Amino acid sequence: SDTPRNRALKEKIAPALARFGGIGVRIEDDYLVTPTGVERPSALVPREIDALERLLSQPRAPRDPSVTARYMRDRTGR
């Protein structure tokens, strides 16, 4: 809808839309069915631009080389 908030968002993301206009994004939710009910872990993932930018600006933990090697072995079979 055409609200002040939506207009501000469109203005803010216009450069990114111009740059990445031909790329699609699909957001999926994951659900876990447990003995006590249904959980949606993906609800913890931010979807608003400000929240995503805050998350992405945080330092990341260094990669564990053994995990990377295991992933590559599993992926390539070597």
Image: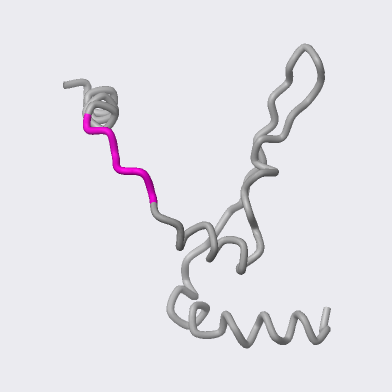
Residue lying at 75% horizontally and 80% vertically, measured from the top left: 6
Quarter of the figure with residue 48 = bottom right
Q: Please identify the dominant SS of the magenta region.
A: loop
Image coords of residue 72 (percent x, y) = 24, 30
From the viewer's perspective, is 1 left or right of 25? right
**Of 73 and 56, the residue lying toward us:** 56
Give left or right: position of 26 versus 78.
Answer: right
Q: Residue furthest left?
A: 78
Span colored in magenta: 60-65
Residue 62 painted magenta? yes
Residue depicted at 69% across the width and 31% down the height: 31
Q: Residue at x 61, y 68 (%)?
A: 50
Q: Quadrant of residue 42?
A: top right
Magenta span contains residue 11: no
Residue 7 placed where, x, y %? Answer: 73, 86
Q: Quadrant of residue 54?
A: bottom right
